[in-house]
């Protein structure tokens, strides 16, 4: 059967559309797969760092690492809760966890260090109502009275000066101030498992108990099919040994 010129044109248009569709797939699908690979790598390394930090906090509290990560995590979290509830929960303390007693040494900065390690730094804008004062002070170098503007909360420091004369004017002032704070985050059991393989991370504690190594459980390349023509690939996400990360 001989195709007409019109049929040939239609077939050509279909071929062009299919070629464009295939080109889009070839360009964008690999990018999506690379983003997926990067996501798992980033999340896995984030969990590894948290796991290492939990053990470091446990060591600072008890004097050594704990091969039972979940127990270490629960003790660190419980200590943080106690320190948050009671500002006097510092120094040598006793924590009971699942019927087991732990003796910990809580530093004065434990809560702050915990929040800055595991929390997420954020900013908010607060409206602050303040008062500005115009004060008069005798300026010896000028040989006359001089005026300046200060915040009201700083007034006591000026009043103690023998050259202070008095307040000339007082005005309320409103300003917007950027406040830095940390959103509290407590590590949970997911920290112990690789988000890709679902296997627990490997921990190695030296015989003297002074060295800690955290490793990715992925030892061989993980390869999964994607969209028939492509593959997702992932290798080991690295190690952390005594604070040194293999990916830095």
Image: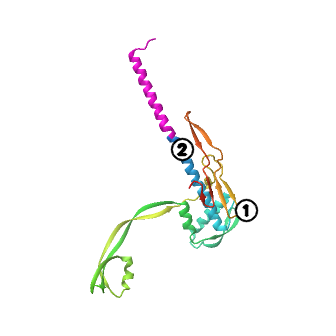
- Residue name at image x 62 percent, y 64 percent: 57
Rendered location of residue 18, percent (x, y): 46, 28
Q: Looking at this view, name the residue that lies furthest to the right.
A: 207
Q: In terms of sequence position, does the residue under pointer 1 or pointer 2 come before the other? A: 2
Q: Which residue is mark 1?
A: 207
- Residue name at image x 70 percent, y 61 percent: 206
Image quadrant holding the C terminus, namely: bottom right
Q: Residues within 10 Å of mark 2 (few under 14, many from 20)?
A: some
Any magenta on residue 18? yes
Q: Which residues are magenta?
A: 1-30
Q: Is residue 179 left or right of residue 162?
A: right
Rendered location of residue 5, percent (x, y): 39, 16
Any magenta on residue 153? no
- Residue 189: mark: none
Q: Residues within 10 Å of mark 1 (few under 14, many from 20)?
A: few
Q: Looking at this view, name the residue that lies furthest to the top.
A: 1
Query: Vertically, is 143 above or below 9?
Result: below
**What predominant SS class does the magenta segment belong to?**
helix
Q: Which residue is mark 2?
A: 36
Determine which quarter of the picture holds residue 171: bottom left
């Amino acid at each position: 059967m001989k195709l007409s010129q019109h049929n040939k044109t239609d077939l050509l248009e279909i071929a062009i559309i299919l070629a464009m569709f295939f080109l889009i797939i070839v360009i964008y699908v690999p990018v999506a797969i690379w983003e997926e690979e990067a996501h798992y790598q980033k999340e896995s390394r984030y969990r590894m760092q948290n796991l290492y930090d939990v053990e470091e906090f446990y060591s600072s509290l008890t004097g050594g690492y704990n091969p039972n990560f979940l127990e270490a995590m629960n003790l660190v979290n419980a200590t943080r809760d106690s320190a948050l509830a009671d500002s006097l929960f510092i120094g040598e303390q006793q924590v009971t966890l699942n019927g087991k007693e732990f003796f910990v040494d809580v530093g004065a900065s434990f809560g702050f260090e915990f929040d800055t390690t595991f929390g997420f730094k954020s900013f908010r804008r607060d409206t602050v109502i303040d008062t500005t004062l115009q004060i008069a002070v005798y300026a010896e170098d000028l040989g006359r009275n001089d005026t300046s503007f200060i915040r009201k909360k700083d007034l006591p420091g000026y009043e103690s000066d023998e050259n202070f004369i008095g307040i000339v004017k007082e005005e309320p002032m409103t300003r917007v101030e950027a406040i830095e704070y940390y959103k509290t985050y407590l590590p949970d059991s997911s920290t112990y498992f690789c988000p890709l393989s679902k296997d627990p991370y490997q921990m190695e504690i030296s015989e003297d108990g002074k060295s800690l190594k955290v490793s990715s459980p992925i030892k061989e390349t993980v390869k999964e099919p994607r969209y028939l023509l492509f593959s997702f690939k992932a290798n080991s996400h690295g190690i952390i040994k005594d604070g040194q990360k293999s990916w830095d």
